[in-house]
Structures are given as structure tokens and as C-alpha cells.
Image: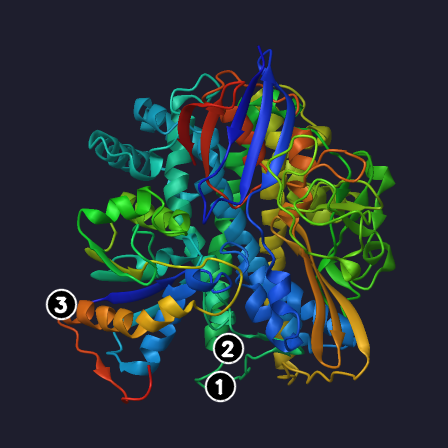
Amino acid sequence: MSQRVTIDPVTRIEGHLRVDVEVDGGEVKKAWASGQMWRGVETILVGRDPRDAWAITQRICGVCTTVHAIASVRAVENALQMEIPLNAQYIRNMIILAHAVHDHIVHFYHLSALDWVDVTSALQADPGKAAALAESLSSWPGNSKAEFTRVKERLAGFVGTGQLGIFTNGYWGHPAMKLPPDVNLIAVAHYLQALDVQRHANKIVSILGAKTPHIQNVAVGGVANALSIDSQSVLTVERLLAVKGWIDQLSDFVKNVYLIDVAVIGGFYPEWTAIGRGIVDYVSVPDIPLDGKNTRFALPGGHIAAGDLSSFKEISSHDDAYFREGVAESVKHSWYEGGKGPLHPYKGETRPQYTDFDDDGKYSWLKSPTFYDKPMQVGPLPRVLAMVAARHQPTIAYATQALDLVSTVAKTKVGLDALHSTIGRHAARAVACAVQVDELARQWDLLLANMAKGDLTTFNKPLFPKDEVAGVGIHEAPRGVLSHWVVIDDGKIRNYQCVVPTTWNAAPRNEADAPGAYEACLAGTPVAIPDQPLEVLRTVHSFDPCLACAVHVVDTEQRPLVKVKAA
Amino acid sequence: MRVAVLGAGNILLSDEGLGVHAIERLSLAYSLPSDVDIIDAGTCGMEMLDELEGLDALIMVDAVRAGQPPGTPVRLTGDALPVFFRSKLSPHQIGLCDVLATLDLLGRAPKYTAIVGVQPLSLALGMELSAEVESVMPVLLRMVVDELAGLGIRASRRTAEVA
């Protein structure tokens, strides 16, 4: 008998994302991803000064504030074809990278690791054996027997109160949980340590961005940070030295803890390298510009067709017509007035037309973006595969290191192809994070070297023409390709469209009724216990949707049977 | 004594952003001691961990769905707080709820927490507050000031016409 499982999150307001799956014979046959809230921020921007757009767009989302600020100023600068100072680029790059490192660490440890790690099983662990295992894999000082003993005692105290608090919603004891107790204890210890480490990344954003969580320092034309070698009130060498200290601590954790944990956990779940493949058409964009006009980049990006790395086509700049002309959005299955076929974002329309949830008709507030008419997967996996295809040496080195460790733990050779999967998305995120933390250190060096040359410029004044101009701001955000598209007429915004990573991944079916990435990747995902659809959450969480979920199971008459809360 | 006044909410969704509007106006209308942190949390989550850690008192200002007529001021403390976070009274419970639960795990949760807010009328797209909520904003600011006074912190009014 087929059952329908609806995962309808209780997030802000009515929830952002709902996932419905049809389960038959113990696996997902069909899936629908639905955005449950109209995010029509674009309409707020029409008629406003383009220089104010970044401050408004960074309020779209509580998780991705800085990325919308960056994409927005880039869009306006692209429309004006203006150059920004090198220092501004380096400071923005450091904010981008520190935010990405923060986001990836928090996503893995605090938002998704507990899909794989059974917290209560850690209470059965032997701290001595756990330490012996962890110390054999890494030089991290937080892997001692004493540390694991303390964590186990703390956990026992917490669980012993009967109030699981933050751990309330886990599927403890679920048959799909496979880690031995010692590995669970190591992971719980690192979960707690990651809470401390993530602060360093947040502090970097806060110092450079003048404030957190909403940065204040970006501006169309550069950044508002005054640089100085000595003055107290500005971004001084002293403050930059503190930033360097935090970068080094992040680097230690990412390489000696995060990358290793992901590989070890992956090694205990080898079957998950064959689950969640779905869409293997990938797109990412180059980022971390090394010049003032966004034509040279530290990290490459591009398109990969059908999972074949030899098909890689590089997107060479933020002005590359190959990207700009390839994007279109369909509203055939979205709650908007349509009938015009897929539209390019400059021509995009956002006029709501709500119907009920109609499996074959409209069922989502998200539009369905395509790249040259095909749905895409975006995120760390497409990013890492593009960088490997572009022969980016640090990416190849970290990917090889991670896959070798997976192979050792799994006692079987696991290659690059394993990355096209649910667990592979986690591995790719850790590899991307290692690359990004190295690049963060490099951008710090570049900024200091440029300041040492006597260049302290951070801002070029933008000039708006009377005529209509249009531009796109592209950013490889933590969750994947983000693009803001702006049309400016006589210094005022005439049209504004944001095509966000989760729109690509959580897209409903497109004009040709082809499913989006979540929908395609969920097909074939096993479900052992329909009212505890842990496996479905694993696949959805592997994309890092910034959402928490409540799970309802409904029978064929759509009557709620069970309601289970899940993180 | 470390005290934070935190405004939560999305300023793009009219009354949903009343907490953020309130703390912006609070700094304009009142002069506060420097050890009181005014935090614009927006809809953020884990980024707030540092700023909320080890507080003596947290005063959260937010839109509260209390089943009251729009514009009704609401104050929650003590036993009423878990309900606020568990039962969707606040539109952005998830982020801050996770942060407070995490601080609880670390044994570093605020020693005292109070929530002051207003029943929203409109959560529609827009950057202005509804007239019902707008009219009660001075009352809301006064509630924050009273809350601070209860902690022994004096906030003095800057001028009569601001606010």
C-alpha cells in the first residue's frame, strides 16, 4: 500500500518548505517540494534607490543575510559596469568566506549531523576507545580520553534530567542509525566543540562587517571600512591580526575535525553513496574575485552535464553571457500568473495566483529555474565537482584525502563517483569548507600586502545614468548559485529578481514537468518507518535547506495520522 | 550585570518586524547605560549565540500571537516562556529557540528572560507597521523601560518629541 508522507515544517510564519513523498515498497516513488511562503521581496524594491537594495535584501533570510547583501551590490555594480577597489574586494571576500565556513560548520554539526549520529547511543561509549580511535585519525587536541569522559558525563547529566532540550526531536534508536557508540561519542564531543569554534567565524564577519548578524559595511562601489595602519577607530592592523588568529583556529578545526568526521561517518554509511543521486546536471559560478571588475577568480565554477566531469564548461566571469543568457524561470507549477512560458529574470513577473496544493498543477510558491531549459542541482557538490574539473589543486587534494579515509573506514575503494549522493553532498561541503578556509587566509594576506603598498582605498562613487541599465550580481553562496537581477531606470529600480540557491534545489516541476533537484533526489530513498521518515530528512538536509521541520503522516484520505517533530 | 534587549522579526513583513522597529526607536527615545546591549537579531539564529551567552537578563521584543485583538500589548515571563517557543506564538521561534536551547545545553542560558510584544495585525509584505500596532509602539517602549527598571536599570528619556 502506498503511503503519503508530508513533511511540513513549522518554521517562521507558515513555514518555508514542505516535502510530500509517496512511499511504496519501503522507498520513495514520487516527491513534491513546495515553498509554503510567498517571498515577494522583489516588489518592495521597485521604485527604490539601487544603493539601498542590499540593506533590504539582506533581510530576506535569517541564515543568509550577508550573501544577499553581496549579490545585491554586485548586481548594481554590474549594471553600472563599475570597478571597485581591490581592498573592498578582499574585505568582501573575507566576509564571504568566513560566512561560508561558519555556515558549513553549523549546518553539518548542529543542523544535520544528528540525522546520522545517535546522541543517546553515545552514553554506551567507552571514552578510552573513542579517544584511541580519534587520536589515530587526527592531531586535534580535543580528542583526549579526559575530554570524551567529560562530554559523556555532561551528556548523561543532561539526558538524565529527562529534558532532552535541543536533542528532543531526534530519531534516537531508529534502525537506520548505524554508528558504533564510540563514534557517536566522538561526534557529540565535536558537536559541542563546534559551538565554540563557529564563534571565530562569526567574529570575523562582525569585525569586517562592522556588525553581525546584519553587516553594515558594504556599499555600491566598495565597502565603508576605513583602513588604517595606526588609527584606533578603523580597521587597523591590530584588528586584522586578531582576524588572522581566528582564521588559524578555524583552519585547524575544519581540517583536523570536520573533514575527518564527515569521512568517518560516510565510511560507516557506504549504502548512502548510492542514495539521493537525482539530478546530476550541475551549475556553480566562479567566486572570490581577484580584480576590481570580477573577471579573475580564486575559485572556479561552471556547468557539468549528466554528472560527466569531461563535459565541464567554465563560467569565466560575472559578465559571462553563457550564464546570463542561460537562466529562465517557469511558473507552470508555481502559484503565480503564467502562460508566457519560462521568462528570463530581467523580464520576470511576480503576480501571485494561489490555488490549493495540486499534485499535477500548481503546488509551490517557488518558481522553477532552469539553465538552458534543464533543471540543475546547485550547492557545495556542484562547486567541488566544477573545481575538480577545472583542476583546482587544493580541491583535488582535499577530495582525495576525504575519499581515501572513507575507503579505509568502509574497507572498500570509494571514488569520486560516490559524491553524487546524499552522503556525498556532506563530503563535498566539508571539502569546499577546507578550500574556503585556506582561501580566507590567502585573502587576508592579499589585503595586508595591498595595504603595505600604501593603497588604502575602499570605495569608488557610483554614477547612475539617465538611461535604463540592467545588471546581474552572481555569488557562489554556501547553498549554491545566488543571482540578483536588477533593471535600473534613471537611478531607480524598475525590476528586481532574486534567484536563490534553494529555488534551484527545491524547485517544483518545470515547464516540461521535469522534477526539481529535491524531488528527483528523493526518488528511491528508502523509508523504513513511514511515521519516522529519517531517511527522507537525510536527503533533504543534505542540501542544507535553512529550515526545521515538523513531520505529519497522512493516510490516503489526507487525514493526519501521526505528527512527529523533527529537527 | 550583562543585559540585552533583543528585537526579533522580519522588517519586510510589516508587523512581523515590530520588535526590530521597537529597539531602533528605543535607542532614539531613551538614553541607556552602556552595559545594556541593544541587538537587532532580525530572523537570525546561531549567529546570536555569542551575544546571548551568559546574560544576566534577556528582554526580547517580538510580535506575539496571543489570541488577542491586534495591537494588544503582551508580556510573558517565567512559566509562560516555554509555551511561547513551543507553540508557534512567535513567527521566528526556530532560530532563537535553537539558540536558547543550545545555551541551555551549555549551561549558559540567560538567568532571566522576559518577552514583551504586541499582537500583530498584518504579516503582509511591506516595510510599514499597521496603524493598530503603530499606535501602541510608545506603550511597548515603555514596557521595555519598565522591564529594565525591574532589573534596577534606569533609562532616561532623551526628549519629549522623539518616540
| Chain label for disc 1 | A
1 or 2: tag closer to the N-terminus:
1
Q: CA distance from mark 1 to mark 3?
A: 43 Å
Type of the residue with mark 2: Val
Callouts 1 and 3 on one subunit:
no
Q: Which residue is mark 3?
A: B150
Type of the residue with mark 1: Asp
Q: Residues within 10 Å of mark 1 (few under 14, many from 20)?
A: few
Q: Residues within 10 Å of mark 2 (few under 14, many from 20)?
A: some
| Label 1 residue SS | loop
Q: Which residue is mark 1?
A: A230
Q: Is residue A203 above or below residue B141?
A: above
In-front residue for pair A212/A400: A212
- Give left or right: position of A308 versus A418: right
Quadrant where the C terminus of chain A is found in the figure: top left
| Chain label for disc 2 | A
In-front residue for pair A362/A482: A362
Callouts 2 and 3 on one subunit:
no
Q: Residue A98, position in %: x, y?
A: 54, 59
State yes or no: discs 1 and 2 in contact (Cβ < 8 Å). Answer: yes
Mark nearer the viewer, 1 or 3: 3
Quadrant where the N terminus of chain A is found in the figure: top right
Q: Which residue is mark 2?
A: A237
| Label 2 residue SS | helix
Q: Residue at x 33, y 42 (%)?
A: B87
Q: Residue B35, position in %: x, y?
A: 25, 73
Q: CA distance from mark 2 to mark 3?
A: 43 Å
Q: Residue at x 18, y 46 (%)?
A: B79
- Give left or right: position of A460 versus A258: right
- The picture quadrant where one finds residue A263 is top right
Residue A103 seen in render = yes
